[in-house]
Image (cartoon, grey):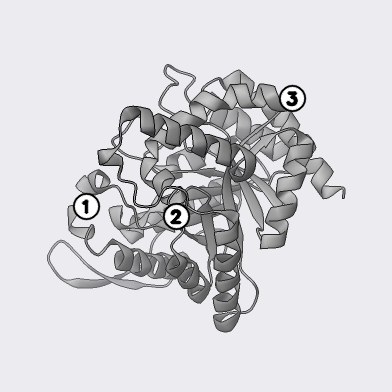
Amino acid sequence: MDFGLFYFADGVRTGTDQYRLLLEGARFADTNGFSAVWTPERHFHEFGGRYPNPAVTAAAVAAVTENVAIRAGSVVAPLHHPARIAEEWAVVDNLSGGRAGVSFAPGWHVVDFALRPENYADRRQVTMDTIDTVRRLWRQEEVELVDGAGESVKLRTHPAPVQPELPTWLTSSGNPETFRQAGDLGVGILTHLLGQSLDDLVRKVAEYREHYARAHNGTGHVALMLHTFVGEDRAKVREVVHDPFTDYLRSSLGLVLKAAEELMPGIDPDQMDPEDIEFLLEISFERYFETGGLFGTVDDGMALLGSLERIGVDEVACLIDFVPDTDAVLDGLRHLARLKQRWEAR
């Protein structure tokens, strides 16, 4: 099981060092044998707003690293022309010497589609079509497009990438159909535990493997994004992550309510008192701290990693930037590296 670093971003950091954690974390990952650095695509909101284009941040990571894979987690496919995606990521592939990879997502936030409102209704099909076109362009095939005069033209994008095939994932918030689609397409799956449990993941990963094996050679690749903070003392870790992770859950309240449905069926956030919402968030924090994140000591982490291995997770994508204290996060990476080393030395 591989270990990568995943960035999603809080809305707190300001000034000229907003990207210090990204770059210093990437350097750490590169020199400590981590598998990948993932950066997201976010628009029109403080939360994550430092990452409007993962190709730009990926290019920055490429310039300061030599070994680690550089991936988008995720490109929101319906917001972009597929030729632009192929061009931008081919540049990243060249800058990095063949280390680029992309996870594609259909998007969900309606405001994001101010960039391309015509694609919102059919965003899932547009995503499938975009993936197909980008992969063809990556192979340097010509594709038929319509030019400014309304004429059909066959075009090939430049520069040519280093890798003959683009390493590709499909991002899923938990929809089983997306897992099956990823298997049918022969791409990886990138998912998380907001809105789904480890028990849910067992069945979905099994279905993904089944569909992948049926349509392609191999078993595919399952990357699981987990909020991560590892330290020497479990109580201290809990203190550090409690408020920022609760804020993160608050920003993802819809997914939190989905996850809590089994405990509180039929809950409606619009009908809940603020005190009830805070109570629910506290319950959710406890649940995720215990079983839905890579929190605590190295020993705590080893127990969770054992569960993930049994499920069939190939890579833990450690989301590290939800804690606003950059120095504390960077210091915690040495403990994460210790966990990685112990896992690999079993």
Pick out the residue farthest to the top: 15
Q: Is residue 9 visible?
A: no
Q: Is residue 81 visible?
A: yes
Q: Where does residue 268 sit, x and y in percent of width and height?
A: 30, 45
Pick out the residue farthest to the left: 149
Q: Is residue 229 above or below residue 33?
A: above
Say which residue appears at 20% left-offset and 73% top-offset: 152
In the image, which is nearer the foreground, mark 3 or mark 1?
Answer: 3
Q: What SS does tag 1 mark?
A: loop
* Residue under pointer 2: 173
Q: Earlier in the sequence, mark 3 or mark 1?
A: 1
Q: Where does residue 131 sit, x and y in percent of width and height?
A: 40, 65
Pick out the residue farthest to the right: 346
Q: Is residue 307 above or below residue 59?
A: below
In the image, which is nearer the foreground, mark 2 or mark 3?
Answer: 3
* Residue under pointer 1: 116
Badge 1 density bin: few <14, some 14–19, many ≥20, Cα 10 Å: few
Quadrant of residue 128 within the rendered picture: bottom left
Q: Label 2 is placed on what type of residue?
A: Ser
* Residue under pointer 3: 233
Of residue 15 and residue 242, the one placed in the foreground of this image is 242
Of residue 56 and residue 242, the one placed in the foreground of this image is 242
Q: Label 3 is placed on what type of residue?
A: Asp
Of residue 153 and residue 298, the one placed in the foreground of this image is 298
Q: Label 1 is placed on what type of residue?
A: Arg
Q: Where does residue 135 sit, x and y in percent of width and height?
A: 45, 67
Q: Is residue 322 above or below residue 107?
A: above
Q: Earlier in the sequence, mark 2 or mark 3?
A: 2
Quarter of the figure that contains the N terminus? bottom right
